[in-house]
Image (spheres, rainbow, N blue to C red):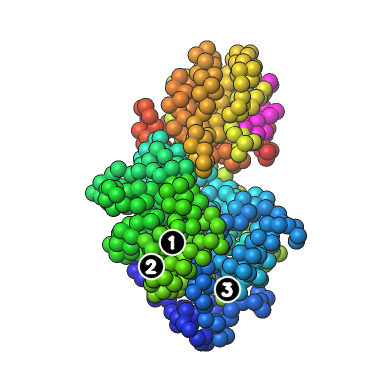
Amino acid sequence: MKHLASPFATFAVCLLATAGCARTATNAAVPLAPSPDSALAAAAAESVAAAPESLALAPGAAVPALTLREKAAQLVMPWIPGDYWANDAAALDTALSLVQNDEVGGLIVGVASSPYDVAEKLNTLQRAARIPLLVAADLESGLATRTRGGTSFPGNMALGATGRELDAYEVGRVTALEGRAVGIQLDFAPVVDVNNNPANPIINVRSFGEDPALVAQLGSAFVRGLREHGMLSTAKHFPGHGDTGTDSHLALPVITASRARMDTVELVPFRAALRAGADVVMAAHIAVPGLAGPDAPPASLSAFVLDTLLRGQMGFRGLVVTDALNMGAIVGRYGAARAGVLAFEAGADVLLMPVNAHATIDSLTAAVARGEVSEARLDSSVARVLDAKTRLGLFRRRLVDVDRIAAVVGTAGNAALAADISQRSLVLVKDSLGLVPIPPARRHRVFVLTYGDENSRDVGAGVVAAWRGAVDTLHTMRLWPASGPASLDSARVEAAAAGFTVFLAASRPTAWHPDAVDIPAPVAGLVEQIAAGEPVVAVSLGSPYVVAQIPNVSTFVAAWSDTDAMEKAVARALWGLAPVTGRLPVTLPPSYPAGTGLQRPAPSEPPAAVRTGSAR
């Protein structure tokens, strides 16, 4: 990767020196890269407020020297919730203490109830910060991944199913514009892990697929879409989290692959992302003995992985961020405060989500003070953080214009893009009884059986809304992880009475819950029993690998997510109102290789009841 010369070098030295100095101010925002990437600066400028802020460190002003602890604090990025805060909320006091007293360098934002909540709280915290905050979020599938009201895309594996580079670029573009509009400047995306292990409980549909070349192509396009529209991008989880059956939130996964295998599989998308200009690389909490040796620490704490491999051999010059330091793979083995120091010593620049930010800053400060690691090493990481903030234009403007949010976030055009990608991503994996589209004789009475956990409370609502009025008798029933024998018996009776069942399952990777990617055994057993006597169309609104749990269903559709746009796409495809053109980007055991996808032609004109199905 070519190292971009930074216009911020002098200013960073001023901050790190023992005495302040000045730099000539300019009116133009500093782009993330030379032309033609200057569109990034323009896009970023459009999403921020024009009014000056008195608390900003203006580039033309004398900058006070940073103490050792202030330098350490610039590397720490704690989590804050994204929901609404009243002015006297305890959570607000906690966040203000992190910003004003600890002077952390950045924040990662959790799930929010509205774009306005996010923007207002981030403006409040930016005003309180002496040095502008670098704000990040995991926007893997668009702003809606963390904020209701943002555009919700169907996820990386859906992009893999369309196979279109432009789709990945467009998702990055919209995510950047919407994210910057609410005050987020760094997206911890895209995931460029190659999902070559069907048992992976935490990557799964977050990956573009199992083919390193496809993941590289789509990941690079996503990176370009983000960067060219104002947002920093992240390639994660280095050096590759796809070939594991363990959730690193709970325990330490081990990747047993050799260096030669990783060079031809896991590392391929990372090299491509770096060539595309990825600004950040997130280090995974995984053991990679084939790279670092049998007794080496996890990749996130390994100097060989982060310094020798990533920086030395692969030439990366951007920010290295750890995966969350509150994850079980790290905390249980190394302790909460010590883990941050070890990650920094290994080569990390940003310590993400430590258990205790204050203690982590103290530990890192003490480690430098006693000579365990040099202050020059600390200075190099601080310079990278400050350089990123300057390239984003944060020293010039740090607030967002709340009045512009409605013109940027969740627009009709963005929703149409998400709907189009969702429709084209559907994959008809099998259909031995010819049930897609649903034959007219089966449309009079339909039983829609749904399954999802508490994170998928509305699963099936989009399909039902689209079909209501088009089906003479439409019965629905919802099953949960805790559904017992009585509920299963009721579902069995409904299915027998209807004679035709559509089963919608929202099983997907969920941190701390490795079983969430599967259908509970009792529910899968019920579907198998129904399929033994009546035709069943099964639709996975999440992990496609659940097809192995219900092998006797005659029809299986991979639909990747339970967004409203995806459910409407499913409803239209099953009714014969839209073509089915997607192909699997992964192999589904036991017998469906990557590339599988039965094709269904373009539809005839639909009846209005289904064509204009209402939103849930």
Disc 1 versus disc 3: nearer the observer: 1
Q: Which residue is mark 3?
A: 131
Secondary element at tag 2: loop
Badge 1 density bin: few <14, some 14–19, many ≥20, Cα 10 Å = many
Mark pair 2, 1: CA separation: 10 Å
Span of residues in magenta: 460-473
Q: Nearer the viewer, residue 238 or 217?
A: 238
Q: Amino acid at mark 2?
A: Glu
Q: Amino acid at mark 3?
A: Ile
Q: Residue at x 44, y 50 (%)?
A: 330
- Which quadrant is home to the C terminus? top right
Sooner in the amino-acid sequence: mark 2 or mark 3: 3
Q: In this rendering, would 497 be left or right of 192?
A: right
* Residue 611 higher or lower than 554, as above or below: below
Mark pair 1, 3: CA separation: 23 Å
Q: Residue at x 65, y 52 (%)?
A: 112
Q: Amino acid at mark 1?
A: Val
Q: Which residue is mark 1?
A: 341
Observer able to see residue 37? no
Q: Nearer the viewer, residue 299 or 336?
A: 336
Q: Residue at x 64, y 77 (%)?
A: 55
Q: Are marks 1 and 3 in contact (CB under 8 Å)?
A: no
Disc 2 versus disc 3: nearer the observer: 2
Sooner in the amino-acid sequence: mark 1 or mark 3: 3
Secondary element at tag 1: helix
Q: Nearer the viewer, residue 249 or 526?
A: 249
Residue 36 pos. (x, y %): 44, 70
Residue 471 in the magenta stretch? The answer is yes
Q: Which residue is mark 2?
A: 372
Q: In this rendering, would 76 be left or right of 616?
A: left
Q: Residue at x 71, y 54 (%)?
A: 84
Secondary element at tag 3: loop
